[in-house]
Structure formats: C-alpha cells, structure tokens
Image (cartoon, rainbow, N blue to C red):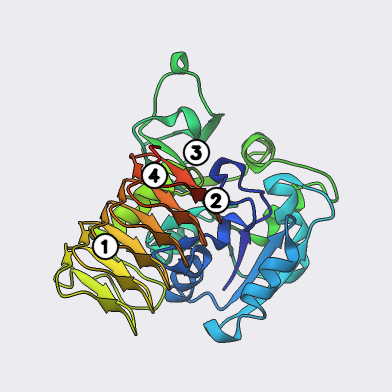
Amino acid sequence: MKAIILVGGEGTRLRPLTVHRLKTMVPMVNRPFMEYQLHWLKQHGVHEVVLSICHMPHLIRKAFGNGERYGMKIYYAAEKQPLGTAGAIKNSESFVFGKEPIVILNGDILTNLDLTKMLALHVRQRAKATLALTLVSDPSAYGLIKHDAQHRILSFVEKPSSDEGHSPWVNAGVYIFDPAAFAHIPAGKPYSAERGLFPKLLTDGERVWGFANHDYWMDIGTIDRYWQAHMDILEGRMFMLPVGQPWKRNRRIRMGQQCRVHASARVGSDIVVGDACTVDRDVRLGELVVMGNRVKLGAQAVLGRCVIWDDVVVGEGAQLNGCVVGSGSRIGSFVRIRPGVVLGEKSMVPDYSRL
C-alpha cells in the first residue's frame, strides 16, 4: 500500500518555530515530527510514501532522502504553486497509480489510529473515499461531518460557526482513496478536498464513508497543540515513538548519552533529555520536560513542563515554566519565562528579563 503526505504548507500557525524549518520537521520529543507519521504508516503495511512538497522543498529532500534509513521508499511530488489539498493529491497521482487504495494524510496529524481497521472498512463498504473521524470539544476550527447511523457521510460543513450546530465527529485529516477518486479532481489548478472534492463526490452519488475512532489524535499545527502533544507523549496518552518502541509508563526518565548531571540536581519524572546535555548544581528539573541535544542548564535553574530544542543555554537561576524554546537560544541568568511563551530559534533573552 502507498501513501501521500501533504507537507506543502508554510506552517504559519506554528511561527516563530517554523521560520527556518518546515512544520513537518519541527522536533517532537527530539525526533523530526514526520518520523512519527512514517513509523505509523509502516506499522500498517505502507512502504512507499509520496511527499507533496511546495515550501522549502530542498530542506525536506535533504532531511528524509529516498527513505532508505526508514526501510521505506520516499518520492517527492513538487508543486510549482500551492494547489490546495485536493490539487496536491492530484499532483501526486502518477506516483501512486495502481489498483490498490491509497492512504492520504495531512502533514500535521499525530495519531495512532488503527489504519488497518480503517482500510478494512473502506474495502467492505466499497467506498470511493473514507475519512477518519475524531472527537473534538470545539468543531469550529475543523470540518464538521454529518453522517447516518452507519457513518456513511451525508454532508460537510467546513469550519462551522456556533449557530450551525455541533457534531461530535470532525474530519481528522486522514483519508483512504479508491484510485478512481482521482478522476474527480481537476488537474493543474488549486482545488480543495474539504470544500471541493468531498462535496462533489457526494453530489456525484459516490460512496463516502467515515471511520469513527477513539484513538489518539492531535493536529499539531498550532503552538498550543504542539506543546500539548509533547505532554501527551510524556504522560503516556500517545503510546508511540518513531524509534519503534512504545512509551513505557514505568520508565519515567529517558536520558541521552554523554550527559553530565550534578549530584545536587533534583530531577523529576516523565522527562526526556537528549545527548551531551549539562545539568549544573542545584538545578530543579521538574516534571514533563523535553530537552534536546547539547542543552546546558546553569546552576539553580528551574524548569517545568517545557519543550527545549537543541543547543539551548539556560543561565543561572533562570525559571522556565510551560514554554517552548527554539534551537540555539540563550536564556540569561535569573530570567523568568511564564507558561505560553514561545521563543524562536537563536533567541537572546537578557539577564533578569521577565517574559
């Protein structure tokens, strides 16, 4: 089975973290985010993946290559101009041509839903397209799905207003297409799957099905949800890591190689520390912290519920809580950073600052 991952967006909702890198390449617990998607696809028998690219194509080609190190084949379908979701899918058609169903997913979806079970539903219902459905508390930012008791989809409402009613199920951004679905997409021009293709399939009388699931799902495309995904992995709500081993509840600290931790430092639980990190005297490393590689924590620094990328230096007595800090940043001594603060790569925070 083959898959298409739509990674053409600029990741504007994740700025400043995506100023210098693609959304699909931001670190998630110290691994490029897309490695989670590749690992999940491979678990369900997908060994050939097409990356639909547009923004910064050279970076993603360099990062993921031909897929050999993942035990997969990776191809690239480049857009000369943004084509929208369905337009990008159509642009990838030549790479996935065949008789088997094709998996398609947005490049910002973190999930461990049962793709094998979803495929079985797709085949059983002889669907032209099957959409994964997930539960969210506020459907206004997603595509609302109306369906019958068997989850055959009846209509779509994209980003509904509060007066349009609420459905417990929304479009999760994971699809399975019958190859014949590509014929419904115009070639070479921008076209939306959510606003164009899916409603057109219904108008044309095609069978479009929903796969309702209760597995973990997160759209990491905003800062808040990116941070929350880290907390979910650390606390065991998302049981998958791209290295192929599930997160274990009883393994509360994961320390990298060649780290130096002062004997007086106090280290909490549910923590991931990268390689070659330095933790100085009397540091308090609280719960739910991710530190990248070569991070240095000065004496008496205090961290809790933070996501720290590579090569960050945190000064003496600094206190960081609930924040995200980009690679190469320098946090001065006795700085205070409150929850919700996000610092882009190579940020400089002077001593005694309050953010």
According to the image, label 3 marks what residue? 153
Counting residues from the start of the chain, the first of labels 3 and 2 encountered is: 2
Between 271 and 102, the one nearer to me in the picture: 271
State how far apart marks 2 and 4 are (Cα). 27 Å
SS of the residue at dot 2? loop
Image marks 3 and 2: residues in contact by CB distance under 8 Å: no
State how far apart marks 3 and 4 are (Cα). 14 Å
State how far apart marks 3 and 2 are (Cα). 36 Å
According to the image, label 1 marks what residue? 299
List x then y, in percent, for residue 353: 40, 40
Between 205 and 330, the one nearer to me in the picture: 330
For the C terminus, give its image quadrant.
top left
Q: Is residue 27 visible?
A: yes
Counting residues from the start of the chain, the first of labels 2 and 1 encountered is: 2
List x then y, in percent, for residue 262: 21, 74
Amino acid, disc 4: Thr
According to the image, label 2 marks what residue? 17
Give the foreground label among 3 and 4.
4
Give the foreground label among 1 and 3.
1
Give the foreground label among 2 and 1.
1
Local packing at callout 3 (Cα closer than 10 Å; few below 14, some 14-19, many 20+) is many
List x then y, in percent, for residue 264: 14, 70
State how far apart marks 4 and 1 are (Cα). 45 Å
Residue at the image point whose x is 74% and y is 67% from the top: 58
Amino acid, disc 1: Ala
Residue at the image point whose x is 70% and y is 55% from the top: 89
Q: In the image, 74: left or right of 277? A: right
Counting residues from the start of the chain, the first of labels 2 and 4 encountered is: 2
Image marks 3 and 4: residues in contact by CB distance under 8 Å: no
State how far apart marks 1 and 3 are (Cα). 58 Å
Q: Is residue 104 visible?
A: no
